[in-house]
Image: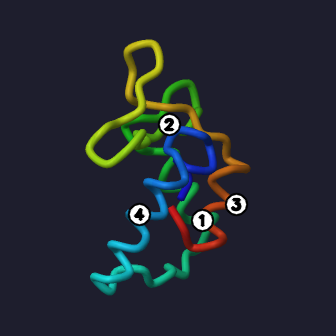
Amino acid sequence: MLAARMGSWNRKESERQDKLLDKAGLTEKAKLNVDKMIEAMRVDKKVKAGEIRLVLPRGIGNMKKINGQYKIKVSEAELRKVLSEGLF
């Protein structure tokens, strides 16, 4: 998961969520066209000054906040890495 890779969410909670999703049968990896996903993200309302921003969890039911903002800048390289693995 992107949030765990970026240090926003601890691995233990991320793994706990993964196990819960697996038990519910919701862990299929998505086959995504990464270029199209990035292109779509560029027109999202959270984009600021051409930079893709996402809302990332800190834990279950708790979102990361920086300088009073929930919209966190995520590099295109990091997005490509996560999307190409079919994880988010």
Foreground of the two, 17 or 86: 17
| Residue 49, percent from left and from top | 56, 24
Q: Where's residue 55, x and y in %? A: 40, 39
* Residue at the disc numbered 2: 53
Give the left or right position of residue 56, taking residue 62 as reference: right
- Image depth: mark 1 or mark 4 in front: 4
Residue at the location (38% across, 63% down)? 17
| Real-space Cα separation, disc 1 to disc 4, in angstroms | 21 Å
Between the residue at mark 4 and the residue at mark 3, the CA separation in whole angstroms equals 22 Å
Q: Classify 10 Å Cα crowding around label 4: few (below 14), some (14-19), many (20 and above).
A: few
Q: Residue at x 41, y 63 (%)?
A: 16
The residue indicated by pointer 3 is 81
Q: Residues within 10 Å of mark 3 (few under 14, many from 20)?
A: some
* Tally of numbered discs: 4
Q: Can you tell which of label 3 and label 2 is closer to the viewer?
A: 3
Which of disc 2 and disc 3 is earlier in sequence? 2
Label drawn at residue 16: 4
